């Protein structure tokens, strides 16, 4: 009886292992429960097509926290994160682009291999497609924001590489993701402009 039960457990674990690996994404190295399963499926679809047609590997590494110590200085945090990401890079297949995120540490980064540096504009991707969704003040949960931001940034990376090769990806989600970034920039610039106008008005009023 004991042997039969052990056999059933072994079979169950084997099936679970096979099922997990068959459904695992090659490009989401870690999601830590931050990425919606549907987004992971789409990322895997885009990543597979990008690898086949563009010969580039696009990866995602997302964590809730990198377990930074509270007594760390800013320099310590930068060094810790840099070393952490360097360890991840060791297992990546070149050429690659790696999108990393740590929600609780408010950290997001884009790392590219040498051949991709002339193709990918790090600031354009992060500031145009990722950060605006993370920083948006709405009713969506952190989970929803992180998931949307990662998918948005991932798709933008793939489209950027595809455009550089004059190739159209069938899995592309289009340029709609850029709209959020544009709206966010306009909103921020508007706040700055309004702030300057109010400041100028206050100064002029005092002089009177």
Image (cartoon, rainbow, N blue to C red):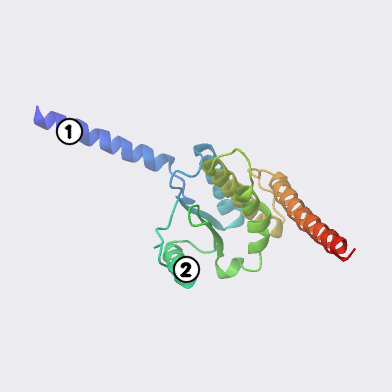
Task: Establish if 38 lies above or below 165.
Answer: above
Check disc 1: other Cα within 10 Å, few if <14, some if 14-19, many if 20+: few
**Camera-nearest residue between 168 and 6:** 6
Question: Judging from the image, what secondary structure is the residue with disc 1 in?
Answer: helix
* Nearer-N-terminus badge (2/1): 1
Residue at left 53%, top 44%?
Answer: 142
**Residue 99 visible in this rendered orientation of the protein:** no
What residue did someone put label 2 on?
A: 82
Residue 36 at x, y percent in the picture = 51, 39
Residue at left 75%, top 51%?
Answer: 187
Q: Is residue 67 left or right of residue 164?
A: left
Question: Judging from the image, what secondary structure is the residue with disc 2 in?
Answer: helix
Q: Is residue 190 left or right of residue 136?
A: right
What residue did someone put label 1 on?
A: 7
Task: Establish if 152 lies above or below 200.
Answer: above
Of tags 2 and 1, which is closer to the observer?
Answer: 2
């Amino acid at each position: 009886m004991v042997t039969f039960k052990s056999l059933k457990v072994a079979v169950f674990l084997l099936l679970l292992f096979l099922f997990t690996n068959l459904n695992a994404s090659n490009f989401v190295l870690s999601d830590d429960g931050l990425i919606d399963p549907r987004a992971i499926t789409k990322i895997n679809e885009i990543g597979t097509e990008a690898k086949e047609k563009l010969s580039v590997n696009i990866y995602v590494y997302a964590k809730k926290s990198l377990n930074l110590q509270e007594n760390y200085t800013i320099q310590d945090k930068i060094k810790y994160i840099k070393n952490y990401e360097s360890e991840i890079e060791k297992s990546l297949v070149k050429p690659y682009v790696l999108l990393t995120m740590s929600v609780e540490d408010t950290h997001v980064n884009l790392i590219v291999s040498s051949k991709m540096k002339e193709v990918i504009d790090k600031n354009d991707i992060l500031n145009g497609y990722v950060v605006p969704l993370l920083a948006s003040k709405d009713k969506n949960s952190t989970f929803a924001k992180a998931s949307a931001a990662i998918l948005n940034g991932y798709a933008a990376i793939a489209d950027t590489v595809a455009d550089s090769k004059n190739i159209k990806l069938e899995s592309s989600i289009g340029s709609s993701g850029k709209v959020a970034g544009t709206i966010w920039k306009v909103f921020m610039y508007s706040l700055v402009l309004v702030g300057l106008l109010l400041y100028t008005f206050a100064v002029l009023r005092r002089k009177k």
